[in-house]
Image (tube, coloured by chain):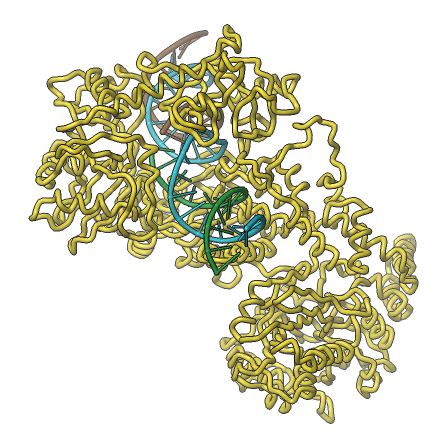
Chain colours: A yellow, B green, C brown, D cyan
Amino acid sequence: MPIPRHKSVPGTGFVVDGFRACASCKEATTFFLTHAHGDHYDGLSERWDRPFYCSTITGQLVVRKLGVKHELLRHIDPDDEDPVTVDGVRVRAICANHCPGAVQFLFEVVESGETRRYIHSGDMRWNKSMMENEALRCFRKEKTRILFLDTTYCNPKHKFPDQTASIDYVVKTIEDRERDTSRGRALYVFTSYNIGKERIFLAVHRATGKKLYAPPDKVAHLSLCGIDELTGALTEDPRTNLHLAKWGAVGETWPYFQPNWSNVEELRARHGAEEVIAFVCTGWAYDGKAEFSTRSRAGLGTIHLVPYSEHSSFTELLEYVAYIKPEEVVPTVNVKDTQKMLKHFTGLTDESSAKRRFLAQFSGGKLASERKKQKKGVEVEAKGGGGLEGAKVASKLFEGQQELMALTGQSADIARDLLKRSRGDLSLAANIFFDESSRTTKIGPSSSSTKIGKSVSPFLGGKRPEAATGSISLGKGGVKPSQITSRLTTPTAASSELDAFREALQSDDFDPVGGGLMSGTDLPYLAIAACMDVISQTKKRLTIQLVLQNLFLFVAHHSPEELVLSVELLLGSLGPEYKTVKFGLGGASVANMVCQVCSVTRQVLRNSYKDDGDLGDVAARFKSSQGLLGKPKPLMARNVHEKLVMISRQEGARSVSKKQELGISLLRQARGPETKFLVRTMLQCLRIGANRTSVLQALAKAAVIHREGKRVSKERLEEAVCKFEKAYNICPSLESIVPALIEKGILPCDISVGIPIKPMLAKPSTGVEAAVDLMGEEPFIAEYKYDGQRAQMHVEEGGKITVWSRNLEQKFGFGDACEQLREALDGECSSIVLDCEIVGVERGEKAGSFRMLSFQELSSRPRAAQSQSPGGTAVCIFAFDLMFYNGTSLLDRPLRERLELLEKALPNRRDGFVMLASKTDEKVTTTRDALMASIEAGCEGVMLKQLSKCYEAGRRSDFWIKLKKDYCSDLQDSLDLVPIGAWYGNGRKAGWFSPFLCAVYDREQEEFQSLCRVMSGFSDEFYTTTTAFFKDGHVIPNKPAYYQTLESPSVWFDPVVVWEVRGANITVSPVHQAAAGRVHDSRGLALRFPRFVRARPDKHVEEASGPDDVVTLYRAEVTTRAGDQQNGE
DNA sequence: GTACAAACTTAGC
DNA sequence: GTCGGACCGATTCGG
DNA sequence: CCGAATCGGTCCGACGCTAAGTTTGTAC
């Protein structure tokens, strides 16, 4: 690998600021470091073992900061009398006016008798006083071949005032404020990156005579800058009101400055000040105004955006190049845009000699025509970019307006108005806009859509334009996304590295050794995102398995300790399953974040969302069309994980905005596919076509291959997957499984009391006969299926009792149930894990009498966050399985034995408190009778269970079949409903209507009353035709007066068709209006578990089911539970 | 400051 | 909780 | 006999009904 040109000195093996990039270059002989900033010393560390040249101060800094060995330093300082000769090359250092210790290197290389001069500016800020420098003068006079230039701000848009003007501004602001004693104590905060702002601090110190507080580390660091006065000006005592703080302490600075007022408030409160005056010093917070930008908030303080740059402004760059007039300029920053930047320098470089030399190359042997072509090219280049002197004021304003339109999605008029109000300050204008729109755009009281789980509809709520009259145009608020995308520059294309990695992931013969995407030993989040992206492109499960497997091989090879973390990121679920991290973010918050990060309005987002049905996709599209002002740092998997956890930890006042800020900062850093999946991760809707089962299977396979090599047999892999699944289902904690798996290939596989096992599940059936058939010849029992809440109760040896839900959530609201269990236990019992249903009951006066309550009544119990006495309705525990007893796992015992033990384990059970689930004696009753009896008793149906089978944790087993009354068409009537409205589907149902709002018809009132939304039971084909059917003439603009519902669907329909819909239950509803007032004063009724059965073209809408039918169903349910029960067993 | 409502999220079935 | 769709491996079907 | 059609199992992601809990905004 050759030395990259912009880090090289031609004719030598010198490398400037290229420790990592050139560490392994054969050509590299000698290393130089211009200054102690991360992007320049990258690769230096305590392991670096070759001598290198730098200034004394820079040397001190890297020794301290990086632990570089002192003896490797070779000093070249601006004060040196004579140049240092290195390998025959004379090298001088001159001040770069950048940060302490920063220098530019001047090289004089003697080659074939000719002295060739090269300047490496490092990072520098040009200053006219540099013209006084003798060495530089010489380089000007004697002709410099190449100026390697710090082109950080090589674009006419980057302007900023003299550093002294900025310093004066800061000092004056402080002095004025200090004089005004009426306003109480002010805390002054200076945020800065690294070293570089020392002159501001010094000036403040001189002006106020006070010391500046800095954290110990910063003090030590600044002390090495070789500025004694500064060292003396610092203190570690925070009582002073001048504070140095870390970058970002008062707001996000990219792409536009956005204040973080909650942090400001925290600073203010912590240091007992009346207000905070903050100074954010940055290179690009300025657009040529006489005044600098500020942001204020009453009661909190003011943030001053002070343009103070350690890099040259655009005009300064031109001045420097013009002064040196080198033959050629080589940009060292933003090198991808080299061609664009070079155009700015045409006319300032000494092209004549460069051209001469260039043409000289062709003077021998080349064809004349070719020579001509080349020559022409150079001339065109030379002509191309002149005339930037006429910096046009009018066009600048126009540009600002255009940019603002793009950012806000607003019309030209609004953009102009915003610019006027911000007096031309683009960033301020953008801020004003987003501030105001977030205040005025209200989410209407539409109870509408809070219902759509993780959909963003609540946030996007309100009517869609075409749902109204269709005449509402995009109007003021709406700019088509395409208008924005076409305006902003496209970002860099996906790197070839990324493409190669994606390709490799799909390879049958993946080689994890190649570290394409790795940065050091840390796993980049991009690897995860790329994997997810590849997976989402396919539906083939074998491919998905392979890709996941390859990713895990990759991680296991490079960074095995990040394996668990990457599994969690791939699952989009952090932490073990039984205590997963909850982000507390939903569609509304994440949509808000996307708006901010992508600088789009809600209106734009809403329009765009309708088409994709996926917020992640929308975000990715907008982000990819965004012009970037800076290059974000790559996201590391570990950082992403940490930040997500941090999001989850925010709670209490203002926590929502803190969460959002964290999320935004993640999104700002996201590249390529990362955006999409970060958004989806926060929404907890990854939608990649792989879930826990697939991911864990792949993990198990990868672990075997990692340990035993590629050539393992298919059987071996299957066996490994099987064992892993078993272990995981019994101990669903990767933390405790994976390390052993990778290191030893051994799996712990025991129940730990206090950690839930995955519950065994039952398969649904379609009727009595089908269910019985599934049991085959095996003896089985029919057990009542109670309508309550599944619970796994653990009694630990110390007597502590924990309750876990079906989804492995710990439930703290069942203190009463725990006590009931304790009383029912055998005195001998030391530890136990049992499976049960907790059902709400109302106990009668007679001992042991009780009445079962509906699920709805049970779930209205308070859900205590921590174990404490619960209130609300009483509960009864119906135990039905025993998995662990007195230190022994019973998972492998047949059900018959487990049931016997269960009965023995609960000798003191009492009716209405702790009971065994009622079951039929398999010899006596028929399944049908059992089902009828269970329904009579107020249960949902029965569970058929084979007595000889063991407990299959986590499996939806064939040995347990659930038989519910609503599975049997002869046992429960369906309802004929009329669709009266709908929403737009998400994800795979984007583009269709889904769900549909369905209603009963009240003949007397002559109105349609909503009963439920329906989205289950439709085929894809039905969706397609039905969506078209309604769109084509049956959508009506407004809700008719004779539609009764508290729902507000996106579109309303004419009542034209009848659908047969089946459900399990009738509940009292807060939103649906069927039979409103009949069983409850104001509330209507709703259908639980609704699903579409078939269309009823034979029925007219007026023949649809009515409120009476629903009321009848409801009453039937209530009466089955009405009678007191005893001896439920 | 307090009380209440609305919005948003998570969770059970 | 409900459901349908897609994929995959095994089995049956049909020429 | 072999390729094609079919079947059953499994996984996944569309969303239904509700409730409570938390945070924010607003009215007194």
Location of residue A146 by image quarter: bottom right
Residue A1119 in sight in this render: yes
Against A514, residue A836 (above or below) is: above
Q: How far across and how far down the image is residue A728, in percent?
A: 30, 45
Q: How many marks?
A: 0
Question: Horizontal placement of A822 versus A187: left or right?
Answer: left
From the viewer's side, name the closer residue of A139 and A343: A343
Question: Horizontal placement of A966 versus A397: left or right?
Answer: left
Q: Residue at x 68, y 88 (%)?
A: A206
Quarter of the picture containing the C terminus of chain A is: top left
Q: Residue at x 79, y 50 (%)?
A: A415
| Residue that sits furthest to the bottom in the current view | A81
Q: How far across and how far down the image is residue A335, in percent?
A: 72, 62
Quarter of the picture containing the N terminus of chain A is: bottom right
Question: Horizontal placement of A450 versus A182: left or right?
Answer: left
Question: Horizontal placement of A768 versus A981: left or right?
Answer: left
Q: How far across and how far down the image is residue A704, in percent?
A: 34, 48
Q: How far across and how far down the image is residue A870, in percent?
A: 28, 47
Against A153, residue A61 (above or below) is: below
From the viewer's side, name the closer residue of A498 and A578: A578
From the viewer's side, name the closer residue of A794 and A976: A976
Q: Residue at x 18, y 35 (%)?
A: A912
From the viewer's side, name the closer residue of A539 and A859: A859
Against A610, residue A399 (above or below) is: below
Q: Residue at x 82, y 77 (%)?
A: A144
Location of residue A123 by image quarter: bottom right
Residue A29 in sight in this render: no
